[in-house]
Amino acid sequence: MKSIALTDNELITRYVDGDEVALKHLITRHQKKVFSYILMSVKNRELAEDIFQDTFIKVINTLKSDNYKEEGKFLQWVMRIANNLKIDYYRKVQRMPTFESNTDFNIFDVLNGTDPSIEQKIITEQIYGDVKNLVQYLPNEQREVLEMRIYDDVSFKDIAEITGVSINTALGRMRYALINLRKLIKEKNVIIS
């Protein structure tokens, strides 16, 4: 099989049909770009290798379960998975409390921490849910940029690279996404405060 001549989608189809070599070619084709992106973000080779491995495990599971929607943007999809796994890792690390070792340790200091009240959490979750629902009404290109920037904390430079557009185009899409989102918030009477 000449993997150079086959498109990503042809390799995916072959892999789903049982050709394990097709997956190897697909990973080989994109591993340098995906790994470099992860390493550039996390700046730790061991962590980057873990996230890279988890990314392709998720890719394989999605392909095997036939949940991949062919849109001709395989690399962007893989990069988004890698980015989400990176964010998940940092969220998990941030949630883990760290303690200074001293003799004045009091468990109630930890329990009474700075966590918001249940009511605050419910209100915040409701607002996020409402806004996230409104985001679905945005045009695909605007929604994609907004989700990567706001929810995934991807830089505009990386967004431009992942989506295959210039930085100015990515910035413009974000601007229009925010303008349209404000209009939707007014139209749907969503209260954000």
Image: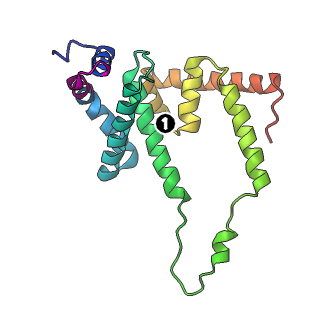
Image position, residue 53 (x, y; %): 32, 42
Query: In the image, is residue 176 above or below residue 150?
Result: above
Q: How is the image coloured?
A: rainbow
Of residues 147 and 77, which is closer to you in this image? 77
Question: Magenta span has 19?
Answer: yes
Image position, residue 165 (x, y; %): 45, 20
Q: Residue at x 28, y 28 (%)?
A: 30
Q: Residue furthest left?
A: 1
In the rendered image, which residue does mark 1 sit on? 155
Looking at the image, residue 190 sits to the left or right of residue 66; the answer is: right
The N terminus: image quadrant:
top left
The C terminus: image quadrant:
top right
Image position, residue 41 (x, y; %): 40, 44
Query: In the image, is residue 157 above or below residue 88?
Result: above
User: Mainly helix, strand or loop, the magenta region?
Assistant: helix
Residues rendered magenta in the picture: 16-26
Q: Residues within 10 Å of mark 1 (few under 14, many from 20)?
A: some
Q: Residue furthest bottom?
A: 103
| SS of the residue under disc 1 | loop
Of residues 117 and 155, which is closer to you in this image? 117
* Quadrant position of residue 6: top left
Looking at the image, residue 7 sits to the left or right of residue 98; the answer is: left
* Quadrant position of residue 145: top right
